[in-house]
Image: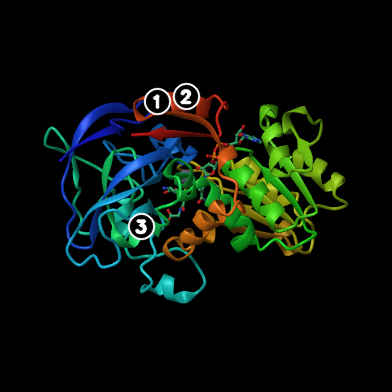
Amino acid sequence: MKSRAAIALEAGKPLELVEIDVEGPKAGEVLVRIVNTAVCHTDAYTLSGADPEGLFPSVLGHEGAGIVEEVGEGVTGLVPGDHVIPLYTAECGKCKFCLSGKTNLCSAVRATQGRGLMPDGTSRFSLDGKMLHHYMGTSTFSEYTVVPEVSLAKVSKEAPLDKICLLGCGVTTGIGAVMNTAKVEPGATVAIFGLGAIGLAAIQGAVMAKASRIIAIDINEDKFDLARKFGATDFVNPSKLSVPVQEAIVDMTDGGVDYSFECIGNVKVMRAALECAHKGWGESIIIGVAGAGEEIATRPFQLVTGRVWKGSAFGGVKGRTELPGYVERYMDGAINLDDFVTHQMPFEKINEAFDLLHEGKSIRTVLSF
Ligand code: NAD
Ligand code: AHE
Ligand code: ZN
């Protein structure tokens, strides 16, 4: 079938709006009509060429929501008409990772996903007969996309797709990193570096966890108003400090915070986030995605003296099991998604959504097909 799509032809160039060909679903696969997709910084990172797994030409996009159009042979858990959120972290429930009880990372489709292919090693997308790569197992920048059944969370049909698409990545990641990865406890102090959707969602998670102090850090002070609305208590602009930001936070908090979160993808900030954690017990969670070849560094003494460095993917959330509950909590008013949507546009304006993200003017732009 034909599908409207925005394709990444080469690194560093705007997406091309074209009509691509999409093949029907094979065994274990599902054809989904994407109704809404947002743009996450990770899409911009891959388009920039900094992603070691970045492939071109490809159909990017991983923060979307849609409706099942057709199911392939052997698909038992979904039928046409079901509302779904595509998952870049699948959940097969059977692999070593899923059965470990220790992680949300699933190995069922990850290897082929990283090569931009469906689990059988081929692509369902083409343009003028030339193969296009899939992306993160989701490719939500196409009106019609094909996704493995294990990479789809079935959610309530009552929920608005133009809001719950944000649970496909940003909001779930930030809340989950606080609740599942760090397990922030009531009364804890928290520092959040980077106030895009991920950082703001981490603030939302810290409020849910009843943190006593939530320090919001960004070099763009325009982000502070929304951070305050989400519940941040203190605000720091590192570019206005005369000392390194970690030193300033240690001074503000009688020795450092209990938990810090890096929500930018900057390895220097990752170091600062670790070093502002309290001696003896402070934990720092890396959420931001750094470019190819970048490495983190600190004095090992920082870890010897009790600080803990961790990372978090999709907030440690098992998508098929847990996302339906996140959707319900949004419907009940317990999770705020609406305030993340700073812009709404028709899909055809997708390159404007990337510009707004780069200019620091948007949190999330939700695009409608
Ligand atoms: P974003 O661009 O909307 O937000 C990043 C924020 O960081 C901006 O407000 C920017 O002003 C701020 N910033 C930039 N440099 C800074 C610095 N030196 N000090 C302080 N603040 C600084 O991005 P986003 O969509 O919120 O994504 C944030 C990061 O999280 C990206 O690296 C993205 O790839 C990553 N991410 C990871 C996961 C995961 O599962 N681990 C999921 C989603 C996104
Ligand atoms: N492809 C990159 C890594 C990208 C990365 O770390 N992705 C995050 C999700 S970002 C969503 O916006 C993640 O969950 N990673 C775990 C996984 O299995 O990909 C690289 O460095 O190769
Ligand atoms: Zn994302």
Please state if 95 lies on the left or on the right of 267 as rendered.
Answer: left
Seen from the viewer's position, the closer of residues 135 and 350 is 350
Please name the residue that numbered disc 2 is placed on.
355
Q: Quadrant of the N terminus?
A: top left
| Residue density around tag 3, few if under 14, some if 14–19, many if 20 or more, within 10 Å | many
Residue 313 appears anywhere in the view: no
Residue at 63% x, 49% y: name it.
Answer: 202
Res 78 → quadrant: bottom left
Please state if 40 lies on the left or on the right of 241 as rendered.
Answer: left
Q: Label 2's element?
A: helix
Please name the residue that numbered disc 3 is placed on.
152
Q: How has the structure been colored for display?
A: rainbow
Res 49 → quadrant: top left
Please name the residue that numbered disc 1 is placed on.
351
Res 216 → quadrant: top right
Please state if 278 lies on the left or on the right of 78 as rendered.
Answer: right
